Image (spheres, rainbow, N blue to C red):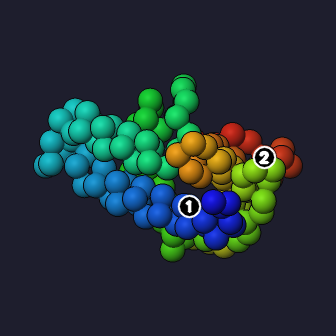
Amino acid sequence: MKNSPDDARKLIEIFFGEMNSWGKKVIELYKQENGGPQKNEEALRAELKLIFDKFVTIRERKQGRISVMAVSIGAPDYDSQLERISEVKQNGTGFIVETQKSYPHNYAELYRYKIKNSDDGLRIDSKERYSEFGGKWVAGII
C-alpha cells in the first residue's frame, strides 16, 4: 500500500500528541516534590524509547533526545497548538512535513521533519530548524 501525504501528516500529529504527553509527565516528575530527575530519569527514558520505537527511524543518534534527555522545563517541546503543520510534500519515496512553531511576542520558528518509508511503514528520520541567521536549514533534535 502506498503512503500518502495525509499519512505523513497523521504520523506527525500522533507523534506530537505522544511527545506532548511525555513532556508534561517529565515536567511534573522532575519537580523535587515528585522525586526529581534522579529518581525518574530511567523510567522516563524507557518511556521515550517506546515512543521513538513507534515513530522514529531506528539508528544511532549521538545528540538525540534519548541520549541527552533534553526537555524544555516549563512547557513540552511538542505542542500541536503551538507548532502547526504548514505543508506536506512528497520527497522521493518519503515526505517532508513543514511546521511553524509560534512563541510569544510574534516570534516563530520553521521546522521540517523528513519522513522515510521503512519496512515498518512511515518513520520520522530527522528534524531541521530554519536558521534566519545562516539562511539555511540546520539539524535539530527530534
Amino acid at circle 1: Ile
Element class at badge 2: strand
- CA gap, disc 2 to disc 1? 19 Å
Q: Residue at x 38, y 39 (%)?
A: 49
Q: Quadrant of the C terminus?
A: top right
Closer to the N terminus: mark 2 or mark 1?
Answer: 1
Residue 61, located in which quarter of the rendered image? top right
Q: Quadrant of the N terminus?
A: bottom right
Furthest residue to the front? 1
Q: Which mark is residue 12?
A: 1
Does any portion of residue 56 appear in the rendered image?
A: yes
Packing grade of label 1 (10 A; few <14, some 14-19, many >=20) is many
Amino acid at circle 2: Trp
Q: Residue at x 28, y 55 (%)?
A: 25
- The count of marks equals 2
Element class at badge 1: helix
Badge nearest the viewer, 2 or 1: 1
Q: Residue at x 52, y 35 (%)?
A: 58
Q: Residue at x 59, y 52 (%)?
A: 122
Residue 119, located in which quarter of the rendered image? top right
What x and y, as percent, mark residue 59? 55, 30
Q: From the viewer's perspective, is 55 left or right of 20? A: right
Tell me if residue 121 comes above or below residue 119 in the rendering.
below
Tell me if residue 115 comes above or below residue 53 in the rendering.
below
Which residue in the protein does label 2 denote?
Answer: 137
Packing grade of label 2 (10 A; few <14, some 14-19, many >=20) is some
Disc 2 and disc 1 in contact, CB within 8 angstroms: no
